[in-house]
Amino acid sequence: MATISQEEENYVRLSLLLSGISPYAIRKLFDSEFDPSCLKTSIKKNYNKLKNLQRKRIISQSQWDLLFPFDGDPNSNMFDVTLMITLLTNLTQLNHCDKLPLVTDTTPSADLARIKYYRNHISHNKDGTISSLFFSTSWNDVIGAVGRLGGKNMLDRCEKLRTKILEQSTVPWNIRVQIDMILEAWKINDSKFVATRAAKHVFKCVQENKCVTITASSGVGKTAILRHVALQMKGIGYDILLVTSPQDILKFYNPAKKTLFVIDDFCGTYSMNQSDLDSWESVITCVCNLLLEDLCLLQKEKKSIAELYLETEASEIVQYYDLYDCFPLLCNLYYVNSELNITDFFQNPFSVYEAEIDKLNTKRHFGKYCALALCVMFNNELEEKLLMGEIDIQIRTTIEKTCEACRLARGTSRLMLLDELKSLEHTFIKKEHGVFKTLHDKIFDFVAFYFGQKMTECLIRNADDVFLRAEILI
């Protein structure tokens, strides 16, 4: 196992400080402002303010579900740092600040801003290294904030972390930190998971077999079950590692640890390279097909999913439960875009989406229209940096030609297109690790088909080569 460099060690220590210790200090301040015994009352009293924050996309849907759970009362132990800071700076007398405060400002508001600033810096760090100069400044800044917010015990924990000998691991620390962040996001989203017989079967199979594969058509719930089971395995002591190839398993394997290796969508969006398939085939020992009669969703399970996502509107779509295999996906898509007509959506969801995109064009919202088209051009992997920094001639040409096909000037500001992409989040688009993509592969298939009809020549001349090879028939 290779020894990590000083710059990598700096990254690991600061990451552990920000993700492992600072949340406890923030929670101590949060509990002093929102007494846990009165949390439900405090949240209910501020419903209108919170709803406004949700409309502005400051509070995400998953965070909203924690504030107003479908079953039971809100529990602040489930709140992440971002949500706690949002509530503290919007519902109390604490000030909101997006910049790094002056060293002389040691108010609770400033300390929250410090922690938020450095957490944001870490989340955008791509190479897993931090210079010693920046580390020294940021470390002192953060532990000062943690000590003031959390007290001496928190400060003592910081000092121990500063001198702690880091365990050598088969998994690079920068990858470990990224995996931990992903698992934390899975945990939040798992609050909307309905336990089904298929999920219980997969959990049992994972415990009894060396390699389990979950299969089904798009939108049936493969990813949701995979993530739920992974979290269950973590709960019983397994180390969860996210991998992309069998070689990763060989590289990260540690015989001293119980480990579950997880890969999502190993066949990719369209099809799998035969050599990739061959490399996995030798380790596949158990297949769980979610469409089989003994694993497919029961009517009572569909009812539970509908009631969880649609609440009082669930009774309006009972007759549409069996129209599409992707019923769980439809419930989730409607949940994040509930302004749509519910009966129209569940009868023919893609006609509704087609009408919504047509509306962008007819109402001359060409920026949003172009933003969706760019997702197709870049094969559902539109990196945010392409709309901000320097780009090569080929990428610039693709963006300009797409703008032109969408009735925008070729010189349209890329920052304006970035704003338009952000405005489509939670309706058509999501952003993961700096990459814009559609909410689900099934939506991308539809959007690709839509723009393939509307701007065929532009797409053939400028779209990503991988996308063209998979999608275009001549």
Image (cartoon, grey):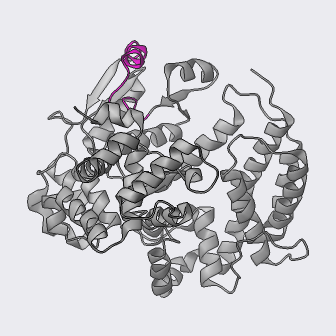
Residue 381 vs 351, above or below: the answer is: above
Task: Determine whether, in the image, residue 130 is placed left or right of residue 116.
Answer: right
Q: Residue at x 58, y 68 (%)?
A: 83
Asked whether 47 falls inside the magenta stretch, the response is no
> How many numbered marks, from 0 up?
0
Question: Viewer-proximal residue, 468 or 70?
Answer: 468
Q: Residue drawn at (50%, 64%), measured in percent from left and top?
A: 412
Near-viewer residue (174 or 261): 174
Quarter of the picture holding the C terminus: top left
Quarter of the rendering containing residue 423: bottom left
Q: Quadrant of the N terminus?
A: top right
Tell me the magenta residue range.
264-283
Magenta residues, dominant SS class: loop
Image position of 157 (left or right of 274)? right
- The residue closer to the viewer here, 261 or 36, is 261
Up-down relation of residue 333 to residue 276 (above or below) = below
Compared with 298, 166 (above or below) is above
Q: Nearer the viewer, residue 439 or 367?
A: 367
Residue sitting at x 11%, y 58%: 320
